[in-house]
Amino acid sequence: MLEALRASNPSSTIFLSFFSPSGYEIRKNYAIADVVTYLPIDGKQNAKTFIDIIQPDLVLFVKYDYWFHYLNELNKRKIPVYIVSGIFRKSQHFFAWYGGFFRKMLLKINHFFLQDPDSGKLLKSIGIESFSISGDTRFDRVTHTVRQNSSIPALEMFKQNATILVCGSTWPGDEKIILSAFKRLKDAKLKLLIAPHNIDKGRIDELYGLTKKQIESSQVQLFSQADQKNLNDCKILILDSIGQLANAYRYGSIAYIGGGFDKGIHNTLEAAAFGIPVVFGPRHSKFREAAGLIHAGAAFCVHNEEELSLIIDTLSKQSSLMVGAGNAAKEYVKINSGATDKILQLLIKSNNI
């Protein structure tokens, strides 16, 4: 979205803010933005001071970002605010009998660019009509990543002719099941690329120690230390570097997306865009694209190591099923792309850029 905004208005100044380190650390040197910063905690004085400093002409919040004091201050100053890739569920407090305070926040937003018609119906039910169904800009982001065709030499060496299970944004609960399934399968062609959600030293050391209990130490390597010599016998490669995962999926045969045994799954679209089957745990109900991929025959939900080992074994042995699921994943991403252009055109039409 920001790249499209920059292309349409090269002289504009773009401020990009993050509330959590997971986003900030990846994009802190993002060339498209003039300034990349943390968003100060949502407080009355913080909001006033921050807006005084940047003096925005237009504000875009993404998906779930509803900050009361920021919205209130922006509304007072009549600065247009848009929600990009917005999505709502009936269970959210906006639609509950006690949700009056939260509904007031929504009324301070000029327009919602929504992912689906159901979200529009929910907004209508509380009297909000200023929305359009544009889709999710993440589909455009992952499509762009595929088109970049960026190679990762270490993963080229690691892949060879193996079946690679790329395990993205994993948590300890995922890793226990993944490693148990790997040990159960005893497939000589199967290799694991594990990219934990947190890559601080303690977390990497924990995962490294856990993997070495499953196979010989020489068969486990860290991406940061990988070279031709130690990758020859490597069966499990731990991705301990920020910013590599999205491209790493291009080397995968199957993707396992972490978080489904914790608070909820992470980004399934990065893997799906490369045309590979996607697997994840049971906590995915809040994610529209997970249901869409399952419905398309591109994704599979597992509840334990037995189910994970079965789906990996089945996909590995039945090439037609593997290819079919991968093609379905790629097609799902393709047909849902285009949100960025829809949003940009409406912003231009409204004279806000």
Image (cartoon, helix red, strand yellow):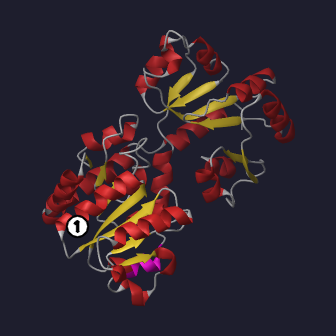
Horizontal side, residue 343 vs residue 303: left or right: right
Rendered image quadrant of residue 336: top left
Horizontal side, residue 176 vs residue 125: left or right: left
Type of residue at label 1? Lys
> Disc 1 on helix, strand or loop?
helix
Q: Which residue is mark 1?
A: 183
* Mark 1 residue crowding within 10 angstroms, few (<14) / some (14–19) / many (20+): few
In the rendered image, the vertical position of residue 45 relative to residue 330, given as above or below: above
The magenta stretch is: 151-157
Instruction: Tell whether position 122 is magenta.
Output: no
Instruction: Tell whether position 156 is magenta.
Output: yes
Foreground residue among 123 and 175 = 175
Q: Residue at x 68, y 25 (%)?
A: 68
The prevailing secondary structure element of the residues shown in magenta is: helix
Rendered image quadrant of residue 161: bottom left
User: Where residue 352 appears, x then y in whole percent?
Assistant: 72, 33
Foreground residue among 29 and 273 = 29
In the rendered image, the vertical position of residue 170 relative to residue 237, given as above or below: above
Instruction: Mark yes or no: residue 43 visible.
Output: yes
Q: Residue at x 31, y 46 (%)?
A: 281
Q: Residue at x 27, y 50 (%)?
A: 328
User: Where residue 330 appears, x then y in whole percent?
Assistant: 33, 53
- The quarter in which the C terminus is drawn is top right
